[in-house]
Image (spheres, rainbow, N blue to C red):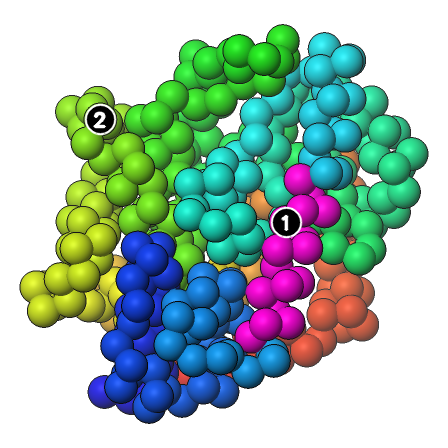
């Protein structure tokens, strides 16, 4: 077992101890590679969770205490800022729904345990201009609106909001079509005229769908598995899994959902000796992916999409390169809507992308070429 995998299992064990308020094994903690564990936790956004487990046995180094303090502070700041945004939406009749981590963090036993990199909120996209103007008034200057499926708003020191017009891009089928008519799934909040939420099963289905999209492209980190463990521990006994099976079948992810659920049920019971081979593979793939996946995984998975049997060849590599130079029209629809609507000017868009590649994304392109050459 290489050092990354060993440290990954240590990180997993300590995370589960923290969730259950269990004192971890003293010998294991004393023999940890502290620096490697800290670095891996930072990459997976699990530093705060693991900190609470370590603190039951030892006095963690200052960097652990500092990282935990920053995570707690960031969550508090995002909560306060989000309250302003949701209040604006309620006052202006904008239907909205907090997503993912905003809901999941409340299920963790201690505030700040579930680290946040941003806040995701779905909203009625017909109000995108009004929202943009409001965010500008709040001082947001790093703004991307109208590209992909969400608008991005950033402001120092830690504020990062992804405002979703749709839950998935149009190119992400069947997910886009399933969630296109999102109103059929929404439940109105009791204390908010325009605030909404998913039912317990529908939140779970969306959580798994979102994770699968990451897992099948660039990969997803251990925090996604931990989120699933937390959710199943809270709601697993009351969820209607016949409904979940029906809906995940529509999305083509029923097999993924079942395998991950069985894995999480074992992890919640600390049954490491009962893990099947594919469950270990799932965990170890997550260990190597970091919180939001990694570039090499993304390239590798895409190359496999271009091969007939999953074996990467020179032909599949060539197909991948051509798809990056000449992307499908869906790409322009999501990221260059002007040129999608005015196809006569697509050659201009090609020149713009070429300019960006040469002068702004050179390092990224070199990294992508290197990732392609590594794949066999």
Magenta stretch encompasses residue 65: yes
Magenta stretch encompasses residue 146: no
Question: Residue sitting at 40 percent across and 89 percent down?
Answer: 33
Is residue 241 toward the left or the right of residue 74 in the image? Answer: left
Residue 375: percent from the left, percent from the top? Answer: 38, 79
Work out whether residue 4 or residue 366 is closer to the camera in this orientation and state it: 4
Is residue 9 toward the left or the right of residue 71 in the image? Answer: left
Work out whether residue 151 or residue 37 is closer to the camera in this orientation and state it: 37
Whether residue 196 can be seen here: yes
Number of the label disc, if any, that sits on residue 75: 1
Look at mark 2 in the image and give the residue it sits on. 238
Residue 253: percent from the left, percent from the top? Answer: 26, 40
Work out whether residue 286 or residue 85 is closer to the camera in this orientation and state it: 85
Residue 337: percent from the left, percent from the top? Answer: 71, 36
Q: Quadrant of the C terminus?
A: bottom left
Q: Quadrant of residue 258?
A: top left
Q: What stretch of residues is rendered in magenta?
A: 64-79
Question: Residue sitting at 28 percent across and 33 percent down?
Answer: 235
Quick one: SS at disc 2? loop
State which tag comes first along the sequence, 1 or 2: 1
């Amino acid at each position: 077992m290489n050092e990354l995998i060993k440290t990954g299992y240590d990180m997993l064990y300590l995370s589960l101890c923290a969730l259950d308020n269990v004192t971890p094994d003293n010998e294991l903690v004393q023999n940890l590679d502290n620096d490697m564990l800290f670095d891996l936790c930072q990459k997976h956004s699990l530093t705060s969770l693991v900190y609470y487990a370590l603190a039951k046995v030892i006095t963690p180094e200052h960097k652990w205490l500092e990282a935990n303090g920053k995570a707690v502070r960031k969550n508090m700041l995002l909560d306060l800022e989000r309250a302003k945004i949701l209040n604006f939406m309620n006052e202006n009749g904008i239907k909205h729904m907090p997503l993912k981590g905003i809901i999941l963090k409340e299920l963790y036993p201690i505030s700040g345990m579930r680290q946040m990199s941003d806040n995701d909120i779905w909203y009625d996209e017909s109000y995108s201009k009004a929202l943009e103007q409001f965010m500008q008034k709040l001082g947001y200057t790093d703004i991307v609106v109208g590209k992909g499926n969400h608008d991005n708003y950033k402001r120092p020191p830690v504020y990062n909001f992804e405002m979703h017009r749709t839950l998935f891009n149009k190119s992400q089928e069947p997910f886009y079509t399933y969630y296109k008519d999102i109103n059929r799934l929404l439940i109105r909040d009791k204390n908010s005229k325009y605030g909404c939420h998913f039912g317990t099963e529908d939140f779970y289905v969306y959580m798994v769908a979102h994770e699968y999209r990451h897992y099948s492209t660039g990969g997803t980190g251990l925090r996604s598995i931990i989120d699933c463990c937390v959710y199943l521990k809270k709601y697993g006994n009351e969820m209607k899994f016949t409904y979940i099976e029906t809906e995940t079948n529509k999305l083509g992810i029923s097999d993924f959902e079942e395998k991950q659920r069985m894995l999480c049920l074992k992890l919640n019971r600390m049954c490491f000796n009962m893990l099947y081979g594919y469950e270990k593979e799932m965990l170890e793939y997550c260990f190597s992916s970091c919180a939001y996946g990694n570039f090499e995984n993304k390239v590798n998975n895409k190359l496999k999409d271009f091969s007939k049997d999953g074996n990467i060849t020179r032909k599949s590599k060539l197909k991948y390169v051509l798809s990056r130079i000449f992307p499908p029209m869906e790409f322009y629809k999501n990221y260059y809507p002007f040129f999608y609507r005015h196809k006569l000017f697509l050659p201009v868009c090609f020149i713009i992308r070429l300019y960006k590649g040469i002068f702004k994304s050179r390092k990224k392109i070199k990294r992508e070429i290197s990732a392609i050459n590594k794949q066999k």
